[in-house]
Image (cartoon, rainbow, N blue to C red):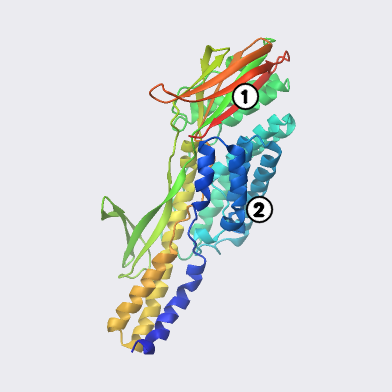
Amino acid sequence: MMKKYKHHIAAIILTLLPFGCSSLMTSLQQYKIVDQLVENEKFEDAAQTFQQSKEEFFDTKDRVLYWIDLGLLQHYARMDSQAIINLQAADFAIEELYTQSISKGVASMLLNDNALDYSGEDYENIYINVFKSLSYYRENNTEEALVEIRRLLEKFVTMEQKYDAEISALQNFDEIKTDVEKIDIAFYSSALSHYISMILFYNDFAFDDARISKEKLYQSFDMQKELFNFPKPNFDSLIKNNGKPKLSFLTFLGRSPIKYEYVFSVDTYKDLVTISTFENGRWQSYSSISWYGIQGGLHAKFAVPKMQKRGSIVSKVEVYVNNVYKTDLVKLESLEDIAFETFKRKEGIIYLKSLARTITKAIANEELNKELDKQTGGGDWGDLTRLISGALINATENADLRITHYFPAYAYAGNFDIAPGNYNIKLIYKDSYNRTIATDTFDNYQVANNKKIDLIETYLLK
């Protein structure tokens, strides 16, 4: 009897195979050894180890992810020319993929996101330019460093246009039988980028431009209070042209968010879809959506990515000069909060796409099973084919957990005037109990008599 109906089961598998082949699991194995090296601040070894993982773990569709993480590790290792090359490659690829996504329209709506080229989160797209700018600064290329900041500012407009195009595509997608809500976000100005441009302009003797950057930095705090919900710093003295050289500090702490899988269960009724989620050991009602034309009796599951903060164990950074306390650095920007804020838009789009894709596959599966019921008489065989095909649908709905792993969580900054000469400079990182976690030392640091701002950049990615 099993042989008689084996071809019916095969028909179900072959029908669902296009969905399954394109639905890949996100691999995280390649980060384990690299994470340990980053934890121990062995950034050059981390970059080399990560580079060696490319062939095994990164397909062409993951090239943006690979280039960004490699470029960041190389930046931390002060391998600036290589960092610029890889971050630039990622930047160009993101722009290319955006252009392609517009031309493809809704063609990729029914593909699991794991099967698509990873085009980066919005915050990744923005902060690529920050780290390129800092690498150019360390190579004494102020002009290109400023180009990167300008490119970053232009991206806020591009991101808005991209989101509008994606919303329009969803609204015109026949398989989505519900209203598509547009989500506004609160991030449109980066204090971190203005801090960098302020220094670059000042060192280029463009003092009025430096002042404008400072004012824009302050406006980032005043106009985006949800994201900049910590004390506004005062950098008036940094660009006060008093004929003295200045030391400024930019410290990156912690690690940016990662993603985890969040599973939903779908049940349909006439013109209505109900959605549940598994929490606290049981399924709970999540929402219901009017879905015009849907029939009752379908059941399926789908998964979407959610972000999880990693933060930092550091709560204070103290600066000492010749073993004398000088200042605390102040929080300048929370990259992790901005990651969460900008992800709101994509999260809504992913949710609707995943729901529509799951319902479409469930409808196609039910139609196939009804046809098989006619041939087999249904009964136990009908239950078996539904069980198999339902399991296949669920297996193809894996959340896309791809995200870069080596952006920091926070940026801290500070500054003071200092006379020309040689100094021993120390940064001490402390936790919330005032315990020392780590130190960075710069012995015999030369402060030149050039009346410019000397930027010292440090990292503690824990």
Q: Nearer the viewer, residue 174 or 14?
A: 14
Labelled disc at residue 96: 2
Labelled disc at residue 21: none
Q: Earlier in the sequence, mark 2 or mark 1?
A: 2
Indicate the position of residue 368 as horizontal and vertical percent values. Answer: 40, 79
The residue under the point 66% across, 45% down is: 86
Give the residue number, with chain letter if any, for mark 1: 456
Dot 2 surroundings within 10 Å: few (below 14), some, or many (20 or more)? Answer: few
Q: Is residue 296 above or below residue 38?
A: below
Indicate the position of residue 216 as horizontal and vertical percent values. Answer: 58, 26
Indicate the position of residue 220 as horizontal and vertical percent values. Answer: 53, 29
Q: Would you say residue 9 is visible in this rendering? A: yes
Cα–Cα span, label 2 and label 1: 34 Å
Question: Which label sits in the foreground, 2 or 1?
Answer: 1
SS for dot 2:
helix
The residue under the point 46% across, 55% down is: 350
The residue under the point 37% across, 69% down is: 391
Q: Is residue 426 above or below residue 263?
A: above
Q: Nearer the viewer, residue 350 or 74?
A: 74
Q: Would you say residue 183 is visible in this rendering? A: no
Residue 103 in the figure: left or right of residue 142: left
Circle 1: residue type: Ile
Residue 136 in the figure: left or right of residue 170: right
Indicate the position of residue 381 as horizontal and vertical percent values. Answer: 31, 82
- In terms of image quadrants, where is residue 274? bottom left
Q: Nearer the viewer, residue 455 or 236?
A: 455
Circle 2: residue type: Glu
